[in-house]
Image (tube, rainbow, N blue to C red):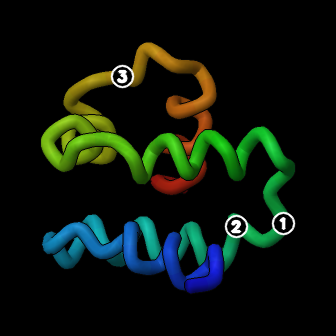
Amino acid sequence: MSEENRLRWQCRRGMRELDELLLRYLERRYPAADAQEKADFRAVLDLADPELNAYLLQRQRPASEGIARVVKRILS
C-alpha cells in the first residue's frame, strides 16, 4: 500500500465532517508541506478519535506545537 493510500485510509474516521477536513488537507496541503509538517500530520492521524475531535472542534488545544500548527492548517 502506498503512503498516500495509507494516509487516505487513516483520514477515514467515521465522522463525515472529520473525514472531509482530513481528506481536504491531505489532498490540498499535504503534497506541498515540508517534511516536518508531514510528520506532524501523520502524528495527528495517530491521535485517538476523541482527542482529535476535541482539537478540530477547538474544545482543546494540543500540547504539541507541531500538532497545533497542523490542526490550524486543517481548519483554515
Which quarter of the figure is the N terminus placed in? bottom right
Measured as percent of width and height from the top left, residue 11 is found at: 38, 69
Left or right, residue 8 beside residue 10: right
Nearer the observer, 57 or 32: 32
**Circle nearer the N terminus (1, 3):** 1
Task: Classify the position of the C terminus by image quarter.
Answer: bottom right
Kind of element beneath mark 3: loop
Residue name at image x 46 percent, y 53 percent? 75
Q: Are marks 1 and 2 in contact (CB under 8 Å)?
A: yes
1 or 3: mark nearer the eye:
1
At x 42%, y 52%, the residue is 45
Q: How far is the residue under mark 3 from the one under mark 2? A: 21 Å
Numbered badge on residue 61:
3
Q: Secondary structure at mark 1?
A: helix
Position of residue 26 measured from the top left corner of the image (x, y, whole percent) = 58, 72
Residue at left offset 47%, top offset 78% = 8
Identify residue for label 1: 32
